[in-house]
């Protein structure tokens, strides 16, 4: 800086230079320019490293660097240029040269990078499309034909129209009306796509994604609507397929827009509200009727995924219910229009993960948050309150409550018992080991010496509680505990979650209860989030029906619970349950009180709780069982394995059910992307075996043609253990 | 005169340019560096060290290049950055308030569901199954969007967009389908809106996915084939019924544009006709479900431009070719035969035939007469309507000014375009016999190759063709296409509308002169179109000088111009008033006269309204395509039109928005047409 100071008077000596004010500005520009030079060099190295990596970040960062460089360059170029011209052979050669070369070097460097980038881009574009495949095949050997090609060779043709029902979070949402801050986003995706807006204006984004806290519908002045058409859920984000692979394969055997329909709906709403607000159920009904009519009377094959499974269960009851509440399709609508329902990864009985999501927003890998996790959850975008913001937003979404475990202790187990008892990852191979089972059955009665996982305790406070025999747990009922005023209320005014209403007394009361089973979980949630559960209990129910003929079950809140509804009267219909197995799936949690209980969510998963031996299912405070990473096999398979098998009270017309499991095998290398044999909750949509099954059914095969059940897990054994009146 | 001035301007500019160049060269020499930079200031800065270090080898040409690019990039990014930082509305530049916001403040809210029917070429098409050359294009847009594939693999692209020459349906192994949903036609190319502005404004007063529907269809097919292949009509019917129900039994407002207008006319007949040919909706369907049909830029009676397009592929500014015009038409990409290739692809599209002029000489005029006679072409000098009416009565004036004979849609040579009809030779092109030519033009076979040179000569000898004989002409030059298409479209005028053939065969349904409107007395029909832009009406042709076997033997004679400055004949084309694509006559006649009151075409007396929008070009570049444009597609951004559509959608009637609004001579023109009503 001293050099600059010295230079100024020298410049102003010259009579030909511009006005002193200009000069002063020039000096200022010079200062900023110099100040940024160091940064530029950092950027250079930065960009240099990333160049080798060739990832997308590179471009963005480079742009930033370039913008900074440009700011420096222009500032430098404009103003000090005047004196420099005049001093061509002046006395300050040395200083000027060094300054010169720096900016020039920058420009030169950016130019080089740009050139290489363009050359690479050009080469990439000039590359024949089959090149990546060629490389893959060179490394891993010839890859199998995609099922579409294979089945086309077999002569399969499109027959039954296909309806896709996407699950939670995978479908896109777009803005139709918004507040000032969302200017320019009309009909742009807020959810799905690149999520660019999350970074640009996070608070605005959460505001628009939230629903009204009281009604569970649109907040005033905001309309966010589902994207319609196949584009709604073919890709979740660029390159991250959901339905795209299935669609592409179906297209090979002749499917097209007129025979495929994506029943996209606003997955934030409760199911009945999608009809109330958007008439989505009516639209789906009309579309199925149209497709059946225009395809020569061939019934539709429905393919729901994830939460779409429950949504479609709701639809089947809705469509046959009489008009004001239902769709008025008459008692044989399903029999007339539906050939098969192919449920993919269906959380029929709920997902334990949903509990933690609602309880403490710690959905470690629920897709909602996972999508945003990298660099988002842990940083300070929302001024340290990211989680609270997300929690506040997601608690306005009624649909998350549809995934709370249903059936209570009967299905999910109580303090001592659970259907999955004795499961351990390493034992999965030896399924037919009779002695094994006996041993475990025997050990059930005694307090276990080894750390046996009590899956029934979905939430326990502290590892000791999770492992102790039930007799040793002292529980203090929390339901009547007084909720104290939170002292720190005023400081947390920005983010208001309902915890602040609970006060310390309420929080401690929760913790004192020690262990929660599936039955008491609902009470717990009602205690910590009364508003949400009030809203939710109008739309969802989590029990088991004693008497299905009770007229109260005509209310729509029971329709999405398979344990409180009868299947429609459609004996020719088939129900498939297809899901992945072989991935540890969250089932129960060890919690602790959060140390700083002021503006934070007061509960946290105790990530320090780890099982003692390697076989233990307890890792990072989470007990895992077999499943597809999100839905435990029990939830996905039980209804088809037992609840609906044969003619039961839940399935009075004896609809045939089939279980098709797909054992997870991770992709062999990076080139395969997300793998063609994956069993993970979303990646299974790219599983070749599953796609082939779906296509065969769509082309006219029945479940028996496919080969009936295909089971890898212990689902039948577990189902037997559940004592449910059928 | 104007051209001379222009020339002088050019020649005046030239030396200046040279001068500056020279200057630059001198400068360059002075500094002795081979690299000119885009702005002198940085150049010098860059050069200074170079000169000094000419001995050193750090800054060579390569480096300079890099430097240049780097500098350009950084400036570019800086500008981009600044542009992004810019507030959406510049202070001082007050963006005009959109009609949506204004009407919302008035308290208008969504009432009737809205169905949009896009026209030809504006709807997107995507690939569902293709040949190996289109391997990675599954569900990518072939039409609409970026059009990048044209440049990358033009022949492959053309192959996939062509239809089967015999059936007019998919060629084997190729499935190209219409993009569904609002995205189908909201933007045609990036930034080139079609429906987007209307959608955005409708959304402001509460429209959204459930009460807004884009009836996208494959616009290459004949209308009935969209039902046969894609069940597009059934889908439209089911969608309208659904929207009617879920929006509280509110009737639907349909907004078709361009060819969508005729498509929807077809739909109206189809839906009430019993199956298997029709949709089986019963005779009350339209009156039950439809509140109003708001035709934008309707092509009811056809578009003369299509004739030249089909005849010689010279669609000078038909939108679908214009989209590819820059650098495609004139380049040699497809091996010198771009136009021929396009002609071949275009001729497989049946839908184009639906745009041929309908109603023959009764509507479009014969050799001597046409309804648009006395049209003053110099639109800027037009007098107010009342005044003109009085002067037009003056026979003297019309005698002075030689009228353009618009009735001669195609004439060979300027003389033929102007001679009185008695002096014209008449020759029936139907009598020409065909011989198979033995030419070896195997690569690109347009149907011209199959024609004998003699016949081509004979066609040219016939000198002048009217709207009726033009059809015969097309039958002669493109027999296959016309044979295919005439099973789907008819271009005549019905004598007796009760003849059962008119209700039974679908080929008459899209011709307003051969169908009755449905029995729906409460339904309203609007004709909304732009005026004030010269629109092609008739052509002067010549035989193509190069009679190489592969070229199209006819060309528009662009050297033909009118005698006076205000002549309507320019570049071989005679113009009338219109919206750049559709002449006023075609757009307005049905609403102004054909259906007005209770006529035989409109037995139930559905009310009709004509709403014209005078074209006003955008005042500055900032306005983009203008908020008051009257051009065929740009009118979709016209504030007046949008407001009318929104008011009707929100429940207003035609009288509520002010009834007719006429600026052109449409009423007088219609009066001159002698048609039994």
Image (cartoon, rainbow, N blue to C red):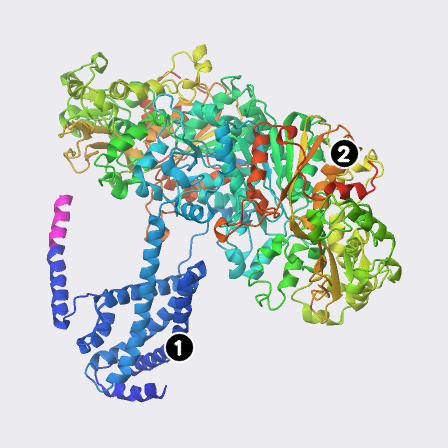
Residue A477 in which image quadrant: bottom right
Q: Which residue is mark 1?
A: A38
Q: Using the image as rendered, state which of residue B656 and residue A485 is in the foreground.
A: A485
Are there few (<14), some (14-19), or many (20+) residues within 10 Å of tag 1? few
Indicate which disc, 1 or 2, sits on the residue closer to the N terminus.
1
x, y (%) of residue B41?
Answer: 23, 71
Query: Is B247 a magenta residue?
Result: no
Does residue B440 appear to the left or right of B303 in the view shown? left
Instruction: State which region is magenta.
Output: B1-12
Q: Secondary structure at mark 1?
A: helix
**Quadrant of the snapshot with the N terminus of chain A:** bottom left
Are there few (<14), some (14-19), or many (20+) residues within 10 Å of tag 2? many
Residue B93 in which image quadrant: bottom left
Residue B374 vertical placement versus A100 (above, below) = above
x, y (%) of residue A293?
Answer: 57, 24
Q: Is residue A254 visible?
A: no
Does residue B144 appear to the left or right of A282 in the view shown? left
x, y (%) of residue A351?
Answer: 70, 49
Query: Is B11 a magenta residue?
Result: yes
Q: Secondary structure at mark 2?
A: loop
C-alpha separation, residue under disc 1 versus residue under disc 2: 71 Å
x, y (%) of residue B586?
Answer: 35, 28
Residue B365 in which image quadrant: top left
């Amino acid at each position: 800086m001293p050099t600059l100071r010295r230079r100024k008077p020298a410049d102003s000596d010259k009579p030909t230079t511009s006005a002193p004010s200009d000069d002063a500005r020039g000096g200022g520009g010079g200062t900023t320019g110099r100040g940024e030079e160091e940064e530029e060099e950092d950027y250079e190295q930065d960009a240099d490293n990333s160049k080798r990596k060739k990832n997308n970040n590179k471009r963005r960062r480079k742009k930033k660097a370039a913008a900074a460089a440009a700011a420096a360059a222009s500032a430098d170029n404009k103003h000090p240029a005047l004196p420099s011209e005049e001093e061509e052979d002046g006395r300050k050669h040395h200083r000027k040269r060094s300054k010169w070369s720096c900016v020039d070097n920058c420009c030169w460097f950016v130019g080089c990078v740009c050139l290489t980038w363009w050359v690479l881009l050009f080469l990439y574009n000039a590359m024949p499309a089959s090149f990546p495949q060629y490389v893959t095949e060179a490394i891993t050997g010839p890859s199998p034909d995609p099922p579409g090609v294979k089945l086309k060779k077999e002569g399969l043709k499109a027959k039954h129209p296909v309806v896709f029902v996407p699950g939670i979070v995978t479908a896109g949402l777009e803005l139709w009306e918004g507040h000032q801050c969302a200017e320019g986003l009309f009909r742009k995706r807020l959810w799905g796509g690149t999520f660019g807006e999350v970074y640009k204006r996070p608070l605005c984004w959460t505001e628009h994604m939230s629903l009204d806290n009281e009604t569970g519908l649109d907040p005033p002045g905001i309309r966010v609507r589902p994207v319609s058409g196949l584009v709604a859920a073919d890709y979740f984000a660029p390159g991250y397929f959901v339905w795209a692979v299935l669609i592409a394969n179906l297209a090979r055997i002749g499917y097209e827009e007129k025979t495929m329909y994506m029943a996209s709906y606003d997955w934030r709403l409760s199911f009945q509200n999608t009809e109330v607000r958007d008439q989505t159920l009516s639209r789906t009904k009309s579309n199925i009727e149209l497709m059946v009519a225009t395809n020569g009377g061939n019934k539709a094959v429905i393919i729901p995924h994830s939460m779409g499974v429950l949504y479609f269960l709701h639809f089947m009851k809705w469509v046959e219910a009489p008009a004001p509440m239902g769709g008025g399709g008459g008692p044989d609508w399903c029999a007339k229009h539906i050939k098969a329902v192919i449920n993919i990864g269906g959380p029929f009985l709920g997902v334990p993960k949903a509990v933690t999501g609602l309880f403490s927003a710690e959905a470690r890998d629920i897709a909602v948050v996972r999508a945003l996790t990298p660099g988002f959850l842990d940083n300070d975008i929302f001024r340290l309150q990211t989680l609270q913001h997300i929690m506040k937003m997601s608690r306005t979404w009624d649909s998350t409550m549809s995934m709370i475990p249903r059936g209570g202790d009967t299905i999910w187990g109580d303090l001592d018992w659970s259907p999955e008892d004795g499961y351990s990852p390493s034992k999965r191979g030896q399924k037919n080991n009779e002695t094994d089972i006996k041993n475990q059955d025997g050990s059930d009665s005694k307090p276990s010496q080894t750390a046996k996982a009590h899956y029934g305790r979905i939430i326990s406070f502290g590892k000791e509680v999770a492992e102790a025999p039930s007799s040793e747990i002292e529980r203090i009922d929390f339901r009547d505990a007084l909720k104290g005023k939170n002292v720190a209320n005023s400081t947390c005014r920005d983010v208001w979650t309902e915890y602040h209403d609970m006060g310390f007394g309420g929080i401690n009361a929760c913790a004192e209860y020690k262990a929660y089973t599936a039955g008491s979980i609902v009470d717990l949630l009602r205690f910590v989030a009364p508003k949400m559960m009030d809203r939710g209990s109008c739309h969802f129910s989590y029990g088991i029906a004693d008497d299905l003929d009770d007229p109260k079950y005509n209310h729509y809140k029971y329709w999405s619970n398979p344990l409180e509804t009868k299947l429609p009267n459609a004996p020719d219909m088939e129900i498939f349950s297809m899901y992945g197995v072989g991935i540890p799936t969250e089932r129960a949690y060890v919690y602790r009180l959060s140390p700083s209980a002021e503006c934070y969510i007061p509960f946290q998963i105790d990530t320090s709780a780890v099982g003692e031996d390697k076989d233990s299912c307890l890792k990072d405070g989470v007990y895992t069982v077999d499943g597809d990473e999100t839905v435990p096999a029990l939830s996905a398979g039980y209804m088809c394995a037992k609840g609906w098998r044969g003619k039961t009270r839940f399935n009075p017309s004896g609809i045939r059910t089939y279980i098709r499991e797909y054992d997870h095998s991770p992709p062999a290398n990076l080139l395969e992307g997300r793998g063609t044999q994956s069993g993970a909750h979303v990646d299974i949509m790219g599983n070749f075996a599953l796609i082939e099954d779906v296509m065969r059914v769509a082309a006219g095969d029945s479940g028996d043609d496919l080969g009936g059940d295909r089971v890898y897990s212990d689902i039948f054994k577990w189902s037997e253990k559940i004592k449910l009146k059928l | 005169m104007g051209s001379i001035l222009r020339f002088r301007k050019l020649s005046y500019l030239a030396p200046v340019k040279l001068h500056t160049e020279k200057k630059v060269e001198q400068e360059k020499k002075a500094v002795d560096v081979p690299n000119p930079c885009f702005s002198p200031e940085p150049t010098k800065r860059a050069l200074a060290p170079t000169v000094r270090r000419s001995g050193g080898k750090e800054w060579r040409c390569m480096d300079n290049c890099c430097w240049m690019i780097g500098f350009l990039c950084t400036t570019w990014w800086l500008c981009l950055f600044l542009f992004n930082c810019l507030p959406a509305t510049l202070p001082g530049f007050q963006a005009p308030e959109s009609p949506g916001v204004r009407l919302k403040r008035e308290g208008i809210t969504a009432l009737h569901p809205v169905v949009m029917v896009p026209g030809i070429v504006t709807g997107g098409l995507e690939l569902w199954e293709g040949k190996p050359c289109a391997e990675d294009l599954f569900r990518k847009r072939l039409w609409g969007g970026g059009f990048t594939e044209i440049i990358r693999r033009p022949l492959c692209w053309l192959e996939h967009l062509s239809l089967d020459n015999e059936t007019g349906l998919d060629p084997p192994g190729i499935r190209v389908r219409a993009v569904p949903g609002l995205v189908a036609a909201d933007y045609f190319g990036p930034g080139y809106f079609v429906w987007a502005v209307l959608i955005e404004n409708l959304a402001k007063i509460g429209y959204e996915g459930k009460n807004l529907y884009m009836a996208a269809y494959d616009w290459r097919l004949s209308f009935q084939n969209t039902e046969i292949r894609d069940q597009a009509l059934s889908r439209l019917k089911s969608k309208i019924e659904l929207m009617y129900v879920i929006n509280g039994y509110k009737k639907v407002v349909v907004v078709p544009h361009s060819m969508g207008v005729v498509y929807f006319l077809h739909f109206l007949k189809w839906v009430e006709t019993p199956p298997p040919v029709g949709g089986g909706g019963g005779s009350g369907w339209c009156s039950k479900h439809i509140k109003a049909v708001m035709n934008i830029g309707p092509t009811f009676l056809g578009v003369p431009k299509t004739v030249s397009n089909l005849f010689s592929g010279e669609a000078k500014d038909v939108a679908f070719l214009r989209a590819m015009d820059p650098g495609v038409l004139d380049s040699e990409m497809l091996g010198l035969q771009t136009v021929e290739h396009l002609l071949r692809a275009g001729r497989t599209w049946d839908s184009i035939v639906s745009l041929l002029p309908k109603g023959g000489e009764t509507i479009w005029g014969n050799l001597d007469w046409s309804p648009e006679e006395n049209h003053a072409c110099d639109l800027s000098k037009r007098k107010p309507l009342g005044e003109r009416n009085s002067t037009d009565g003056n026979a003297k004036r019309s005698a002075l000014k030689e009228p353009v004979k618009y009735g001669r849609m195609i004439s060979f040579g300027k003389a033929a375009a102007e001679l009185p009809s008695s002096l014209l030779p008449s020759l029936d092109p139907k009598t020409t016999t065909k011989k198979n030519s033995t030419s070896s033009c195997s690569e690109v076979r347009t149907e011209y190759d199959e024609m004998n040179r003699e016949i081509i000569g004979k066609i040219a000898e016939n000198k002048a063709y009217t709207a009726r004989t033009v059809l015969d002409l097309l039958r002669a030059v493109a027999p296959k296409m016309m044979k295919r298409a005439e099973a789907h479209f008819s271009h005549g005028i019905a004598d007796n509308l009760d003849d059962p053939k008119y209700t039974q065969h679908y080929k008459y349904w899209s011709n307003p002169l051969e169908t009755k409107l449905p029995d729906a007395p409460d339904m309203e029909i609007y004709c909304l179109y732009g005026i004030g832009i010269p629109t092609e009406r008739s052509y002067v042709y010549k035989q193509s000088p190069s009679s190489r076997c592969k070229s199209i033997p006819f060309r528009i004679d662009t050297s033909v111009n009118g005698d006076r400055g205000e002549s309507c004949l320019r570049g071989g084309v005679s113009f009338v008033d219109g919206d750049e694509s559709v002449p006023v006559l075609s757009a307005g006649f049905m609403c102004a006269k054909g259906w007005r009151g209770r006529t035989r075409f409109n037995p139930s007396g559905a009310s009709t309204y004509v709403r014209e929008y005078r074209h006003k070009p955008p005042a500055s570049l900032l306005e983009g395509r203008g908020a008051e444009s009257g051009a065929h597609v740009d009118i979709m951004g016209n504030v007046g039109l949008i407001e009318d559509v929104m008011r009707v959608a929100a429940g207003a009637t035609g009288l509520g928005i002010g009834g007719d609004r006429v600026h052109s001579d449409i009423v007088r023109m219609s009066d001159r047409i002698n048609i039994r009503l």
